[in-house]
Amino acid sequence: MPSEGRCWETLQALRSCDKGRLCYDRDWLLRGEDVLQECMSLPKLSSYSGWVVDHVLPHIQKNAPPSETSASSVSTSALDQPSSVPRSPLRNPAYSPVSSATSNGTKDKHESPHTEPVVLQSPRGMKVEGCIRMYELVHRMKGAEGLRQWQEEQEKKVRALSEMASEQLKRFDERKELKHHKEFQDLREVMEKSSREALGQQEKLKAEHRHRAKILNLKLREAEQQRLKQEEQERLRKEEGQARLRGLYALQEEVLHLSQQLDASDQHRDLLQVDLSAFRTRGNQLCSLVSGIIRATSENGFPTVEDQAAAEGALQEMRDLLSNLHQEIRRACEEKRRRDEEEARIKQQESQMQQRPEAHKELPVPNQGPGAKPNEDLQMKVQDSTMQWYQQLQEASSRCVLAFEGLSNSKDSQAKKIKMDLQKAATIPVSQISTIAGSKLKEIFDKIHSLLSGKPVQSGGRSVSVTLNPQGLDFVQYKLAEKFVKQGEEEVASHHEAAFPIAVVASGIWELHPRVGALILAHLHKKCPYSVPFYPAFKEGMALEDYQRMLGYQVKDSKVEQQDNFLKRMSGMIRLYAAIIQLRWPYGNRQETHPHGLNHGWRWLAQILNMEPLSDVTATLLFDFLEVCGNALMKQYQVQFWKMILLIKEDYFPRIEAITSSGQMGSFIRLKQFLEKCLQHREVPVPKGFLTASFWRS
């Protein structure tokens, strides 16, 4: 056992010394050296001996039986007996474990170029070497087999990947080809669809063309029928116009004949000592009126029904005038006879007094000689025809109120909402009328016309139409007419220029919707009776406030408005009326006559001059009326107009001045100065704010 410990110590020492690093070349056969020479040489210690000693032998010794241990000790001791072996150079130091541990490319400084290997004489060493060789061979075989298997696996993987790549390439080509087929199919379908749509559009256009051609043919036939109808209507209108013209000539002839009878009454002036100049003056006015109507109709074509009615009214007035003249002559004759009898009685009494000087003489009656004039009062009542017209308009207004009474008094929330929307749609556009631009005015007119025509309009962000309620149209017409008159009462009263844009819209609506015009007149006559002209009479038993309201005053809490405010409102409404009768909507039908033209203005002027003037009112209204439409009346009636102006100056001014107090002379002086200026220049100026052609282009 002691020898065994020395053996391991020896091996450990050999491993740690330079001599333990012996070279054992395993590949000597590969280099082709002589095998026999190797066999003849003494065995050498392998370079792996140290590894075997450290790793293999300890495990064998632990597992070996004692008998083997003794034997190994003997053999190991034998290993410790070196044999004389000649020194040989170290052939391959790279295979040494120690040299591998220092494989940085430099030789150990303790290693000499020639090492003396230890000679092995024991079979144990050969066995170990053989085991090592066998282990290396097995290891190489296992490595080669593993390498071969790895290569096979890699080849299989490469083949599988190649096949998979080939399949994927095929699938890619197939998908690409499928995509191309689908794109081609889609393109072909799109082309076919486009072709079908084009054919359908072409057929549709052909159908529309045939439909339009059919409509055009119908329109052409309708236009031809309309033309023939218009020609027939024009022929009938001319025939009726000629008949009315012949009637006017007959009326004028009769009026002139009656005028001659009036002139023949001058022979009674000195005889009866009465002044009949008023009858002659009025007769001349009526003759001039009929002559003006005939002159106007000769310039404008044929007379209208209104012209014929005006001429018939003048003829009837002339007849009444002649009848009144005859009554006046009879009354004067009776008066003269009574005076003659009175004078005879007085003379008889004087003769009796002379016979009885002691009796007291009686005083004579007041002298009514040639210088005395009877009271020449004008009428305070309007003509019967005008009064009938006034009453008809008020009745029409009352019927309209009754027509929408259900909508006005409805408790239903939906009906109330409809009523409010309709009222806003009717009144707001009228409030927006101004003198800014004609294009804005046209938009307002179109909106009002669309509302009255039953078309939906936008108001307050909602669509409104009179068709929403059966009574909607009556309600809108009434409220619209009321708003127009209220604009004259408020807006025109404050800004006189506003009368013209409001009037031109009202005139255009009046022309297209005559009922609105009739309601405008009804509201105007009710708020301003002087526009009729009509002076309401105080009836017995009537309350004073009611009578003041009939005269046009506003009465609130038993307080009557101031006279200045009253005259301002009346002035605004008369100015609006004077603007309406002379203006027409520029985009309307010029072939139609004005629904309420200048002839009504001439009638108003003539009738108000036939009535007794009212203090402060008549002068104000005459000035406003003549300032607004005097220029238009001058162009229309020419000489007859100036005769009317002279009549106002010479005959009517004294009557106005006679009833006007010193504190109310302002309106009278303003009227007098205006007419004197017009007579001086023989021209009535164009009113301020009159709508010119430039206004409609703006």
Image (cartoon, rainbow, N blue to C red):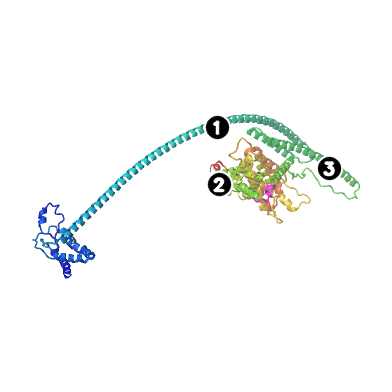
- Mark number for residue 436? 2
The residue that mark 3 highlights is 339
How many numbered marks appear?
3
The quadrant of the image that shows the N terminus is bottom left
Alpha carbons under labels 2 and 3: distance apart: 71 Å
Task: Give the foreground label among 3 and 1.
Answer: 1
Q: Position of residue 94 (x, y in %)?
A: 16, 58
Residue 10 sits above or below residue 252 on the image:
below
Q: Which amino acid type is shown beneath numbered disc 2?
A: Ile
Separation of residues labelled 3 and 1 (CA atoms): 94 Å
Q: Secondary structure at mark 2?
A: loop
Residue 198 vs residue 612, the one in the foreground: 198
Whether tag 1 and tag 2 are in contact, CB under 8 A, the answer is no
Residue found at the very far front of the displayed protein: 67
Say which element carries label 3. helix
Hey, which quadrant is residue 224 in on the image? Answer: top right
